[in-house]
Amino acid sequence: MLNASLSVPPELSAPQVLETFEHGLIGTAIRRSPLDESDLAALSTPGTALVSSAIHRDPQLFERYTWAPRLVAVVSDGSAVLGLGDVGPRACLPVLETKCAFFKRIADLDAIPLVFSDRRIDAIVAALAALRPSFGAVSIEDVAAPGCFELERRLRGALDCPVMHNDQHGTAVAVVAALRNAALLTGRDFAAMRVVILGAGAAGIATARLLATAGLPDLTLVDTRGIVGARRRDLNAAKREATTYTNPRGLTGSLEDALRGADALVGLSRATVAGTLLAGMRPEPIILSLANPVPEVLQEAARSVGAVYATGRATAPNCVTNLLTVPGIFHGALSAGAAQITPEMLLAAVDGLVRASLPMLDADHLVPDVLDPAVFSHISAAVGAAAPVS
């Protein structure tokens, strides 16, 4: 019933895709280039020395005269890349460059990819702490669980700037908003829904936590060994903690047992789900099949049970992805001068995405297009308004 093998779609190796990334996807752009002798003087030693001296005298000028306060460091060790798994730091660079490009395209935030070959949490934290004057925020990407939880916690303690693990919180915000919209679309009470999350890694656990915070208590996590519950003795610390806010009915067994009578299935795993398992769900189920590049549930199987269906693929309708949420969250946090990203800010981001969705909400538009400017503006404004006042 569950198959963890991964078949990569052939279009991912198409020549035009590889050509897009030739010599890298991103680069730096000079905002002001020397055009004549007066510009050259301003942009060479005499001018730059004046700016450096001004910042030395008044450190607050750093905010105005450098790019660092609005620069996002996109950080990874390459240990959990998309649906590919551990491909290492070099192979994850195209993914990080893509995220940096989206930061610029969507939120007009500069971003730079940083990959670590040394995966020790102490080493990554020490390196980023030493580099702290060079950036304004840290976006953690594609770091495997359970280490990603500790890395985020440690970085939040070590850095006085917004830190967020995309795969956890950016994904969670998108999923919670999509489920709220799907509940509205299908006439369900969001708080009374039974939701099954397939995948108990970083994204699955963070999504369960945010759903519980948002007031949805009937959550069931399922990993490769079945339903995650307090009676299991093979759970890591993150999964054990998750049992305190999931599985209130004490379910045991397989994914099939979890899906019986469920309203929604959220796929955040590398598994494949047989269509026959969906028959036990409630009529008109909600299926968010978000694995990349191959979704857990294929569209044909979802349609066979009359499901409201979404995937994580940008080229497909109803794309539920952290690309919808992360640029706006960081823009809102940086614009507000926030030193951290709080649970309240994440719930505000959910509200922002829901508001952006309502004008066109239907079965084919559960969430807006990733490049819809209304998404970014609603999320940024909501997050900024919810940021703690320093």
Image: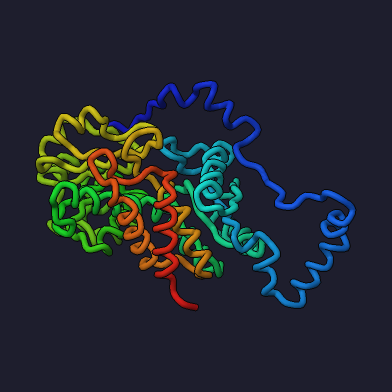
Q: Total of numbered circles in the picture?
A: 0
Q: How is the image coloured?
A: rainbow
Residue 359, horizontal then vertical, whole percent: 29, 50
Question: Left of 75 or right of it: where is 193?
Answer: left
Residue 376, image x and y in percent? 44, 53
In the figure, is residue 211 to the left or right of 292?
Answer: left
Q: Quadrant of residue 169?
A: bottom left
Depicted 61 relative to depicted 8: above or below: below
- In this rendered view, identify the residue nearer to me: 263 or 64: 64
Q: Is residue 15 above or below residue 262?
A: above
x then y, percent, for residue 240:
29, 58
Q: Residue at x 47, y 62 (%)?
A: 332
Say if residue 348 shows up in the picture: yes
Quadrant of the frame with the N terminus: top left
Could you say where residue 364 lies in the image, as x and y percent from the top left? 27, 38
> Residue 160 is drawn in which quadrant?
bottom right
Residue occupying the point 55% across, 60% down: 137
Task: Tell which of 183 and 40 is nearer to you.
Answer: 40
User: Can residue 237 be seen in this snapshot?
Assistant: no
Q: Nearer the viewer, residue 349 or 312?
A: 349
Residue at image location 79% in from the left, 67% down from the top: 51
With respect to residue 32, does 86 lie above or below?
above
